[in-house]
Amino acid sequence: MTNGPLFQKQLPVGAIGRRASGWWGMLMLIATEAALFSYLLFSYFYLASQAKTTWLPIAMPSLRLALPNTIILLASSLVLWWGERAMRRGLLIRQLLAIGLALVLGMVFIVVQFLEWHLKTFSMTDNAYGSLYFTITGFHMLHVLGGILMLGVLFIWAALDYFNAERHTPISIGVVYWHFVDAVWLAVFSSFYLYPYLR
Amino acid sequence: MELDVTDTDFYRTPIISQASDPENAARLQRLWETPPGLRGQLTTVDHKTIGIRYLVTAFAFLLLGGLEALMMRLQLAHANQHVLTPEQYNQMFTMHGITMIFLYALPVLSGFSNYLWPLLLGSRDMAFPRLNALSYWVFLFSGLFIYASFLAGDGPNSGWFNYVPYSSLSYNPGQGIDFYALGMILLGISTTVGSINFVVTLFRSRAPGMSLNRLPILVWGTLTASVGNLLAVPAVSLAFLMLWMDRRVGTHFFDDGGGGNPLLWQHLFWMFGHPWVYAIVLPAMGIISDGLPTFCRRPLVGYTPVALSTVATMFIGFGVWVHHMFATGLPPMSLSFFSAASFVIVIPSAVAVFAWIATIWMGRPVFKVPFLFFASFVLLFVIGGVSGFMTAAVPLDWQLTDTYFVVAHLHYVLLGINVFPVIGGIYFWFPKITGRLMDERLGRWNFWTMFIGFNLAFFPMHISGLLGMPRRIYTYSNGYGWDTLNFVTTIGAFLFAIGVLLFVANVALSLRRGEKSGPNPWDASTLEWAVASPPPPYNFAVIPTVASRHPLWESHLSEEGSDSSVLDRGPLLAQGRETMGVTVLDGEPDVILKMPPDSFAPLVMAVLLTALCYSALIHSGWLCALSTVGILGCLLIWLWPTALVQSVKCQTMDVHYD
């Protein structure tokens, strides 16, 4: 018995697409981060269910800023998806454009979110709802900030011509993280802004 | 080495070579060796070095935790003693629990797995070697961080599960709880990156042919524990962050007055805590499932049921956390559900127990020291399992909760399923790690002292618990009928400690004077025994091809017509640090993975993360900002793509993404 035949085909060397260890590493990071946000939202629903008096310190959360902001964040994911498709065909300029645009949209999200925080009539230390609201949206915001830094670095690497149609694993890794952060926002948004209307 | 830049740098058919070729060995040695000296010590990413560090550090914490236990036992040896003040006693039992559960029990198993995984799987390193180094350094620093509370004169004192409101600011204004909370967040980072590393290593870097149904059970155990950790650790990190925020920022998560709820702490803690219990026993059970059959001279009975029950235990383990909270006034519906789930979890455990007994029964046992530890584990696990089964019943739990019965149960489980397999595992793999066998005679003394001491110490606790002695009291009066039992327990504890010292002595002696072992002293069946003892830095001179669960026993196990494993001939992979990447399920060659060089980045990152936690402790915005910037910079350097081929500038870059 020899193991010859097993190794007669050519194998790619190094990080390539979904064969890269980094891709799998990011999926694992996403799994544990998803668990983190589940526990955050568990705390929210648990305390809401156990509340003895009024739970919401305000009448009802306003959707005036939050809904458009949600759409902005979703749009950024769409743009990145479009860019990565272009990268697979080797269209670097379109990829750069996509990362740049997603960066801008991400920053707009952050600014609007700060505005939203500013307009709230309660604070983190007033009551449990306030603690949860600012902690959970704050956690999410940190993740968006992390994503923005990641996109910034990817923009520089792409501009330095580090990637081509076949080898652009870091972009795929960054993009899947960004999609995850958007998906988390949908969960956070539904819990804080939609759920009270259903109660 | 001059290279022409052609397509072959990005695609290559591996060169097949002989393992025995000395030229290959010399070349691989140059590529993988960590240079001696301080620089090498601080930068190494070799999984074997990291594994040994994990083992030694965890063992040092075990000794510390043991000292704390002995002080408690002195205090409780007789009624009305004054060895410790009540406050000192509180700090002792708290630090004893923290040390044993968090700083010893999982890290020691990570030590085994880090050392053994690539050897068991036929690879040259873990998937993310630098992440591996990071997880060790962060573990070490988090342990030192929590212990630094003693230097600040204020150890944590609310028990290892740290219930609010006793751990909240109004009842506990000192810094001890903050040290504990922030240290646990730091340790959570270590556990998380370590777990990611194990899971991805399993997915990617195995020998060709090492399909899922051929994995050693230790790998199944650590894999299951790692997946469990990824999903469970965020709960406790979050709980400790919320607690710290309640204490120092002024939030109201756990504070009833502000709309919070103290029970939220218990939920989050035990949602983590119970899966964690399985994380610190499943890999140890894996040590048994791989080690015990070697001394029974036959393969494990029921490989598939044992592998599946390992996974099933963790799965059910996520649905039993409320059995720690039966006495908190939850609705009967919830109690019934979680009680039933806790009964169900007995089934997969029983599957494994019967598999081990059947393996001993149907084998030809060789009564070496590792066998003694492994076989006694089965007995201790049954005793601990039965007392756990008893407390899964709600009415009995109401009677027994917070008594010494629970203390007896958890020590039977944790020492029985963790410490005994770990010590047995050291006896078993010591020759692989050091090239020398441990002393058998001293080993027998070591085993019997530990075994008798253990049962003498902990069995009477069942009775003192049934007699109503509460846990965590610093002293008691005469006349409750607890005196003799406690005295016996103290004697047993010291006997057990002598047993542990005999083990340390045996390690120290055998390191210098142990009999040379050769590659496979036990005639064991798995891949780690195919390489030299101690293994060379590159593990395997050629990547082996695996065709069965027992590559080294194929000559007398294999059925006619079946393939056999090839260990002496295979892909060389020596153009830089390289190893084979395979497909997830079937283990077919998929990619040639480039592995990173030694690096300072993990150590620097660990220091910066510790600085970040310290900044939270001393409320320093400056240190916080500085360490955050440092962490980001370090990440950037760590992840910066390196060219696959140095001579090509601004060409396609390759990334060691870890």
Image (tube, coloured by chain):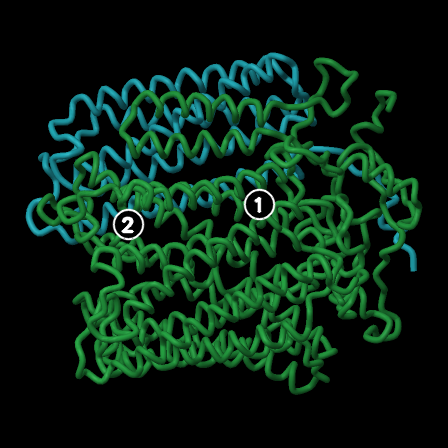
- Up-down: is B579 above or below B222? above
Circle 2 crowding by C-alpha within 10 Å: few under 14, some 14–19, many from 20: many
Badge 2 element: loop
Q: Nearer the viewer, residue B161 or B310?
A: B161
Q: Quadrant of residue B456?
A: bottom left
Badge 1 element: helix
Work out whether mark 2 precedes mark 1 in sequence or the reverse, and give the earlier one: 2
- Up-down: is B346 above or below B208? below
Relative to A115, is A1 on the left or the right?
Answer: right
Chain B appears in which tint?
A: green
Q: Identify the residue shown where x is 56% and y is 14%.
A: A156
- Up-down: is B189 above or below A174? below
In front: label 2 or label 1: 2
Which kind of residue does numbered mark 1 sit on? Answer: Asn
| The label number, if any, that marks residue B197 in the structure image | 1
Q: Identify the residue shown where x is 65% and y is 21%.
A: A163
- Residue B40's spot in the image, x, y percent? 67, 34
Residue B229 in view here = yes
- Residue B117's spot in the image, x, y percent? 66, 54
Task: Give yes or no for contact between labels 2 and 1 (Cβ–Cβ under 8 Å).
Answer: no
- Residue B121's spot in the image, x, y percent? 71, 54
Provide the letter of the chain coloured cyan: A
Q: The disc numbered 2 marks a residue on which chain? A: B
Which kind of residue does numbered mark 2 sit on? Answer: Pro
Q: Are marks 2 and 1 on the same chain?
A: yes
Q: Nearer the viewer, residue B416 or B209?
A: B416
| The label number, if any, that marks residue B657 in the structure image | none
Q: Nearer the viewer, residue B575 or B100?
A: B100
Q: The disc numbered 1 marks a residue on which chain? A: B
Q: CA distance from mark 2 to mark 1?
A: 31 Å
Relative to B350, is B477 on the left or the right?
Answer: left
| The label number, if any, that marks residue B156 in the structure image | 2
